[in-house]
Image (cartoon, rainbow, N blue to C red):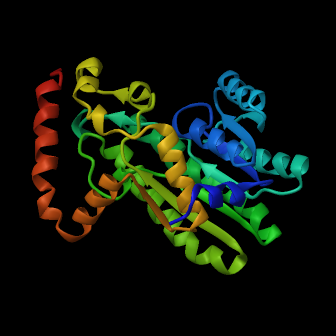
C-alpha cells in the first residue's frame, strides 16, 4: 500500500495540468495535488470558475494558476502545454479529466448528441494527450492520466454514447502506455465509479424527466470527489495502468470480467426502470 506520506513526497515541486479542473473530480485533483506540493494549472472552459479554484488554492498556501481552454480545440491544448512549459520549465503531469454525458436510449438520440460527446470525451483526451506527450517525449519523462469511468469497463445502458467514449479512452490509454514506456512517459487511465459531483446535473437528458431520473441515482453509494482524487493519485504513484475505485467498483469490474452473467439482471433492471421514466413523443 502507498501511504499518504509517500504520496505527499511524490508530488512535491512537480508541475501538473488538470483539464476540467474547475469542478468535480478535476477540482478535487487540483486541491489534492496542491496539498501534496505540486504547482497546478486549473484548466477549464469556464474561465471564471477556474480562476476561483486557483485563487482558493493559493489562499490556502498552494501554488495554482488558471487557464481557459476548450479541450475539443487541438490548438488550444497545444498552447496550454507549451505555455505551461514556457512558464515552469517542464510538465510533469497532465490530467485529461474534462467530459460530460448524455442520458437517453439510442432510439431517442441524434448524431449531434454523439458528435459533441466524441469531440469532448474522446478527441479532448486525444488532443490533451498529444500536446502533453510531445513535451514529455522531448523531456524523456512525465505522466499522463486520462480520467475515464467504470462505464468504460462495463456496459452502461441508457448512457450508451457516454460509455462508448469511455471505453475508447481506456483502449487509447492502455495502447499508448505500451508505446510510451520506452520513451520515459507513463500513461494511466482512471476509472472511478459514480462520484458525487455536479456531473449528473450537467448531463444532457433526452426523453426523460431529469428530476425523476436524478432521484433514482444511487447517491448513498457515490464516492466523494476528494476520496476519488486521493484514490487516483495513489494509483498514479504506483504507475497503475488502470486505476479503478472504490472497492465496490473493483468488485463490479471483477464480476464483469469473470462472471458477466451475474450482472446481466442488473443491466436489464436498469433498462426497465429507465423506461418507467421515459417520455413518449
- Residue lying at 64% horizontally and 74% vertically, measured from the top left: 180
- Residue lying at 76% horizontally and 54% vertically, measured from the top left: 12
Residue 99 visible in the picture: no
**Is 192 situated above or below 137?**
above
Image coordinates of residue 67 in percent, x first then y, are 75, 34
Give the side of residue 15 with respect to residue 100, left or right: right
Give the side of residue 249 with respect to residue 191, left or right: left
Image coordinates of residue 103 in percent, x first then y, are 31, 34
Q: Nearer the viewer, residue 48 or 236?
A: 236
- Residue lying at 62% horizontally and 50% vertically, measured from the top left: 95
Q: How many marks?
A: 0
Residue 200 visible in the picture: yes
**Is 174 situated above or below 79?**
below
Q: Quadrant of the C terminus?
A: top left
Image coordinates of residue 11 in percent, x first then y, are 71, 56
Q: Residue furthest bottom?
A: 182
- Residue lying at 26% horizontally and 53% vertically, measured from the top left: 155
Image coordinates of residue 1 in percent, x first then y, are 50, 66
**Is 187 situated above or below 93?**
below
Amino acid at each position: 500500500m502507498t501511504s499518504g506520506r509517500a504520496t505527499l513526497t511524490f508530488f512535491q515541486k512537480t508541475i501538473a495540468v488538470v483539464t476540467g479542473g474547475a469542478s468535480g473530480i478535476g477540482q478535487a485533483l487540483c486541491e489534492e495535488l496542491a496539498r501534496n506540493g505540486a504547482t497546478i494549472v486549473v484548466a477549464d472552459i469556464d474561465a471564471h470558475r477556474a480562476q476561483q479554484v486557483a485563487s482558493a488554492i493559493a489562499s490556502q498556501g498552494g501554488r495554482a494558476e488558471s487557464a481557459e481552454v476548450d479541450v475539443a480545440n487541438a490548438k488550444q491544448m497545444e498552447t496550454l502545454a507549451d505555455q505551461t512549459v514556457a512558464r515552469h520549465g517542464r510538465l510533469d503531469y497532465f490530467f485529461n479529466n474534462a467530459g460530460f454525458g448524455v442520458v437517453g436510449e439510442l432510439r431517442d438520440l441524434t448524431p449531434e448528441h454523439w458528435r459533441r460527446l466524441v469531440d469532448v470525451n474522446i478527441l479532448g483526451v486525444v488532443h490533451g494527450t498529444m500536446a502533453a506527450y510531445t513535451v514529455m517525449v522531448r523531456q524523456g519523462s512525465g505522466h499522463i492520466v486520462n480520467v475515464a469511468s467504470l462505464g468504460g469497463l462495463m456496459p452502461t445502458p441508457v448512457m450508451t454514447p457516454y460509455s462508448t467514449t469511455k471505453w475508447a479512452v481506456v483502449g487509447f490509454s492502455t495502447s499508448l502506455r505500451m508505446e510510451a514506456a520506452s520513451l520515459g512517459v507513463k500513461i494511466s487511465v482512471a476509472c472511478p465509479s459514480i462520484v458525487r459531483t455536479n456531473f449528473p446535473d450537467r448531463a444532457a437528458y433526452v426523453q426523460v424527466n431529469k428530476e425523476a431520473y436524478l432521484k433514482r441515482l444511487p447517491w448513498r453509494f457515490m464516492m466523494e470527489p476528494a476520496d476519488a482524487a486521493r484514490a487516483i493519485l495513489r494509483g498514479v504513484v504506483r504507475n497503475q495502468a488502470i486505476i479503478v475505485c472504490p472497492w465496490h467498483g473493483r468488485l463490479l469490474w471483477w464480476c464483469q470480467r469473470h462472471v458477466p452473467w451475474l450482472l446481466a439482471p442488473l443491466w436489464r433492471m436498469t433498462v426497465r426502470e429507465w423506461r418507467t421514466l421515459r417520455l413518449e413523443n
